[in-house]
Image (cartoon, rainbow, N blue to C red):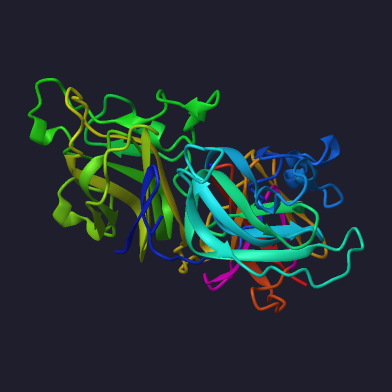
Amino acid sequence: MNRRAAFAALAGVCVAAMGFSASAQLTNLALDKTVVTSSNENANMSGANIVDGDTSTKWGSNYAQYTGADTVKRDSAWFYIDFGYVATFDSLDLLWEHSAALNYKIQHTEVPTTNDSGWKTDTIITGEVYPWPDDGHTPLHRRIKFAMPISARYLKVRCTKRNFQWGFSMWEMRVFNTLGTNLALNKTAVASSSDAAPGLATDGIMFQNGGLDFGSRWENNYGDGRPDSLKGNDWIYVDLGAKYTVKYIAIYWEHSASGNYVLQAWTKPGTPTAPDSDWTFLLRDTNLTYSKPPDFCQTSFAVPPTATQYVRMHSYKRLPPPAGDIWGISIFEFEVYGTSASTAINPSSLPRKASSSNVNLIRTKEGIFIKGNTSGNLSTDIFAPSGKLIRHLSGADASFWNYRDSFGRDVTNGTYLLRVTSAGKAAEDKIAIYR
């Protein structure tokens, strides 16, 4: 369930963005998702084959339906993936079959159409020449890395010209988010006022039964008697549970969004207080526009890397709504991304903690298997006896530490701390290594 002082507006959705890069995250977000195509060559070459994880099955467009010299229609085909929620991604793997597109576009939207209307073009590829003979299995593997992350529910490949006399064909498409896990997921949120609980902005729920879940969002207490100028003057912050170096923040606003807000971090000792002067400024956004439909608007920013446990959005003004609308401000999801900020841990001085019920550590002679009991991305930080962070591991449900640091060197004897995050919950354990 990822974010970007340059602003870019997406069709139908407003987005503010800056470039950002982070360590690799290998979860394929497209796996087994719904695929809609312009056509299929036959029932065995449907769009579902693109996301089934099987590189021996493929999608093919139905070029044969166009006869004679109708090359314009033969050179036009597309498919799009419906993630079922707003996914954040920054890289793609395309495994074209021999009948690859010579020219194509990567596009995204929140309201899909069967033509190019409403789709935002992220990149245009031209001259994609297949360099190998048609042996029926060797793919043309194309990796695409976007300059900035993209968040969207629908992702489209729009083919505009063929390589050969056949149509278009692809074995597999994989979509990746290298930002890491959402540090705010299921974490405690606090707000200056609420008509709907602040925790609904960090529960990871935005869609239900194919549509927006308006029951899972934070809304400020704008009040019928509250002056219009103050209906959007409120704040919400998330407690990440530990200190992280925050690098990227995404907010999925309901259409009742803020017209002037700042993002802030708490960098002082203790728990946060309300005055703005006590918070560290990260950035300001006044770029949002009222968007209905599609009933929500996403803003995403890379922020100055900041060590903090608390991240806040403070709104000073709501967007001017259409006549008759009296609401305040509302957020579907508040997401935070970053890396562990702690580098001063003394593992040997920490009390012994048992792993939480959602994490298992299995020690062997060769290393330690780290497994999650629940479905979700697994993230592990390993700290040396000196307290220095020496290794970061990530995986879908499991990872393995081979007793080596990030440079591949064998670790020395001593007590190491493993801090594990699984399904939004954190656990830690001490491991004594003597070999």
Going 71% across and 39% down the picture, which residue do you hit? Answer: 39
**Which region of the structure is painted magenta?**
383-402
In the rendered image of this protein, does residue 317 appear above or below residue 164?
above
For the question of whether residue 244 can be seen, the reply is yes
Is 204 placed left or right of 48 in the picture?
Answer: left
Numbered circles on residues, count: 0
Residue 338, percent across and down?
A: 46, 59
Is 40 placed left or right of 239 in the picture?
Answer: right
Name the residue furthest top.
224
Going 75% across and 45% down the picture, which residue do you hit? Answer: 61
Residue 107, percent across and down?
A: 53, 52
The quarter holding residue 196 reads top left
Give the quarter of the figure containing the C terminus.
bottom right
Going 56% across and 38% down the picture, which residue do you hit? Answer: 114
Residue 395, percent across and down?
A: 67, 54
Between residue 240 and residue 377, name the one nearer to us.
Answer: 377
Between residue 80 and residue 133, name the one nearer to us.
Answer: 133
For the question of whether residue 348 can be seen, the reply is no
The quarter holding residue 390 reads bottom right
Is 186 placed left or right of 286 in the picture?
Answer: right
Residue 12, percent across and down?
A: 39, 42
Between residue 237 and residue 428, name the one nearer to us.
Answer: 237
In the rendered image of this protein, does residue 180 appear above or below residue 356?
below
Q: Kindly report the secondary structure that dominates the magenta region of the rendered protein.
A: strand
Name the residue furthest right.
135
Instruction: Decide whether residue 214 is among the magenta residues.
Output: no
In the rendered image of this protein, does residue 156 appear above or below residue 126?
above
